Amino acid sequence: MSVALQVSDLRLAIGGVNVVDGIAFSVAPGEVMALVGESGCGKSLTAQALLRLLPRQVRQTGGRILLEGEDITALPERRLRQIRGRRISMIFQEPQAALDPLSPVGAQVREASGLASVAAREAVRRMLAEVGIADPDRRIDQYPFELSGGMCQRVMIASALISRPAVLVADEPTTALDVTIQAQILDLLRRLAAERGTAIVLITHDMGVVADIAERVAVMYAGRIAEIGPTAAVFSRPRHPYTALLLAAIPRLADEPKSRLAVIEGSVPQPSEYGAGCRFVGRCPFADARCNAEPPPLLETDDGHFSACWHTERLA
C-alpha cells in the first residue's frame, strides 16, 4: 500500500523537555486519520511540525517526516516554500482569523494556487463551487467579513486544495462552527478524500467527529501516542486505560436524565512533571511500580491495533 505521509519517532522539545515524544504514524492516499487528545497533549504542535511551521520556542529534536517518500525534516526554507500549499496544505480552526480581511477571498485562493494567468479566475471559481459555495461568481469578489463562518471555512478548504496536495492537515476545522455546518464540512472533507485521493490528518479533541469521518485514530496523551488503530476497533474495544476512560466520559442518549457523568480523576501532567515511566500513571486505575519506572512501548494487540500499556490484557 502506498503512503502519502509517514512520521517516524517525531520529538519536539521546549527547553529541555520533549513535549511531543516519539510520535509515529502513516497515512495512505484517500485515508482520513484522526489525531485526538485533550488540550495540551501535543496534537497541534505535531500538525505544525508536519509543515515545518513550529513556533520559535519549539525545536524538533528527533524523527523523520516523509512526504511521498521525501524526507522534509532537513530541507532548506526555500524548498519548503515550494512544498507548502502545493504538496501538503493546512486548514485552521478559526478561518476568519486566518484569512486576510483586506483581500477578496478569490484573490486569496488564487494566491494559494500559484496561478497568475487569465485562467486563474476560472480555476478559483470552479474550486469554490467544488467545496460547496453557492453563487461562486459573486462570492469570489467578496471579503471575509461578508461571509459566514462556514463559508470562510470552505474558502480555507478551497485554498488548501486548489493545488491538489497529496496531504491535507486539518487542525480542529469544525471547532468554531455550529453542528449543522460542522456536519457539512465533515461531509465535504470525506468526499474530497475519496474523490481526490487526498490523505487527511484530522486534529481534534471531539470523539464524535472522529467516529463520523476517520478510518483510523491515534489517541495522544501528554505528548505520546497511547493507542492507535482502526476507528471502529478503538471505539468498540479500547486497549489503553486512557482511551477507555475517555470513551466512558462521553454522554449518551441512553443515560438517565441528570445522571452523573463519568470523569477521569486527576489532571494531565505538565511537561516539567513527566516521570520516567508511563505519563498516564497518576490517573490510571491499573498503575503499579513498573508503570512508574518503565515507559510502555507501543505494541500491536490486534491486527493494526496498537497500545502503549503494561496492562492491556486487563482491558480485553
Image (cartoon, rainbow, N blue to C red):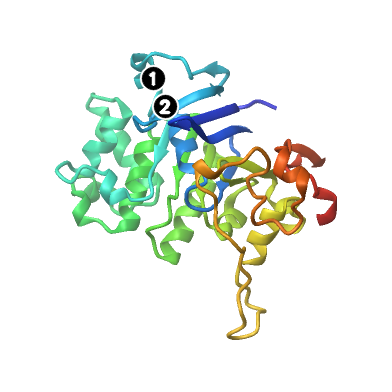
Q: CA distance from mark 1 to mark 2?
A: 8 Å
Which quarter of the rendering shows the C terminus? bottom right
Observer-nearest residue: 102 or 76? 76
Expressed as whole percent of the image width and height from the top left, the position of residue 81 reads: 34, 21
The kind of secondary structure element at disc 1 is: helix
Q: Amino acid at mark 2?
A: Arg
Q: Label 2: few (<14), some or many (≥20) within 10 Å?
A: many
Question: Relative to residue 147, is residue 281 drawn left or right?
Answer: right
Rendering quarter of residue 75: top left
Q: Residue at x 40, y 26 (%)?
A: 86
Question: Relative to residue 134, is residue 169 drawn left or right?
Answer: right
The kind of secondary structure element at disc 2 is: loop
Q: Label 1: few (<14), some or many (≥20) within 10 Å?
A: some
Expressed as whole percent of the image width and height from the top left, the position of residue 252 reads: 63, 73
Residue sitting farthest toward the bottom = 257
Rendering quarter of residue 32: top right
Q: Residue at x 85, y 50 (%)?
A: 313
Expressed as whole percent of the image width and height from the top left, the position of residue 8 reads: 61, 26
Front tag of 1 and 2: 2
Question: Are dots 1 and 2 in contact, CB under 8 Å?
Answer: yes
Residue on which disc 1 sits: 80
Q: Residue at x 18, y 46 (%)?
A: 101
Nearest to N terminus: mark 1 or mark 2: 2
Residue on which disc 2 sits: 52
Question: Relative to residue 49, is residue 268 drawn left or right?
Answer: right
Observer-nearest residue: 112 or 228? 228
In the image, residue 91 sits, relative to residue 187, either above or below, namely above
